[in-house]
Image (tube, helix red, strand yellow):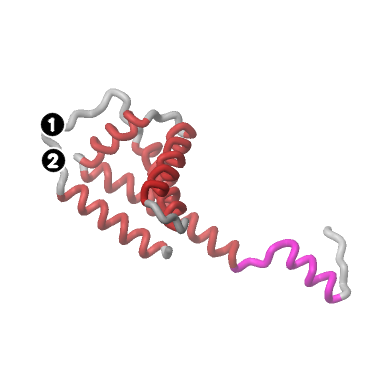
């Protein structure tokens, strides 16, 4: 999936969430996940969603089970429990300016990952470069 398409999906999601949000009655949770950490978590969550989406599973139940396991691992990695994550997401959804800043970081990180992935896909591997050198009959020692 291209980064432009990913960014478009995030913007559509952001507009949907902010258009339907109501800041009245949404208090800051006691265990609010900080914005930077929330951006890191959401980046990993969206990568997990994309990963599950690439699987050719016959059942949406199977997809959901796999995604929930991946999400649990992500939250564990960042030391955040499910309740704190959900309450924080609801809080940030009720504050569009904060959620927009978080998703700006998510989009930036996904673009970086996409650029690294693209660069590594086009760069020859060390093994390929070695075979080319050996195959040409000019074996060179590393300096």
In the rendering, at what x and y percent does residue 46 appear? 40, 49
**Numbered range of the magenta stretch:** 122-136
Q: Is residue 132 left or right of residue 44?
A: right
In the rendering, at what x and y percent does residue 37 appear? 40, 37
* Vertical relation: 121 (above or below) 94: below
- Magenta segment: does it hold 106? no
Magenta: main secondary structure: helix
Q: CA distance from mark 2 to mark 1?
A: 8 Å
Residue lying furthest bottom in this view?
136
Rendered residue at 46%/32% (across/down): 76
How many residues crowd mark 1 within 10 Å: few (<14), some (14–19), many (20+)? Answer: few
| Relative depth, front residue between 73 and 17 | 73
Residue 22 - label: 2
Residue lying furthest left in this view?
24
Q: Is residue 15 left or right of residue 59?
A: left
Rendered residue at 54%/60% (across/down): 117
Residue 39 - label: none
Residue 127 in view of the camera: yes
How many residues crowd mark 2 within 10 Å: few (<14), some (14–19), many (20+)? Answer: some
- Magenta segment: does it hold 126? yes
In the rendering, at what x and y percent does residue 1 appear? 43, 63
Q: Secondary structure at mark 1?
A: loop
Check disc 1 and report the residue beneath it.
25
Decide: marks 2, 1 in contact (CB < 8 A)? yes
Q: Secondary structure at mark 2?
A: loop
Rendered residue at 44%/52% (across/down): 52
Rendered residue at 32%/25% (across/down): 31
Residue 105 in view of the camera: no
| Relative depth, front residue between 28 and 60 | 60
């Amino acid at each position: 999936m291209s980064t432009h398409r990913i960014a478009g999906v995030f913007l559509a999601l952001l507009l949907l969430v902010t258009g339907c949000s109501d800041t009245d009655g949404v208090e800051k949770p006691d265990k609010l996940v900080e914005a930077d950490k929330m951006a890191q978590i959401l980046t990993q969550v969206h990568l997990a969603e994309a990963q599950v989406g690439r699987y050719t599973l016959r059942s949406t139940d199977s997809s959901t089970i796999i995604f929930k396991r991946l999400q649990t691992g992500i939250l564990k990695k960042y030391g955040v429990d499910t309740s704190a994550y959900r309450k924080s997401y609801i809080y940030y959804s009720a504050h569009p300016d904060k959620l927009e800043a978080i998703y700006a970081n998510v989009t930036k990180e996904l673009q970086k990952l996409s650029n690294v992935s693209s660069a590594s896909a086009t760069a020859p591997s060390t093994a390929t470069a070695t075979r080319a050198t050996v195959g040409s009959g000019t074996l060179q020692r590393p300096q």
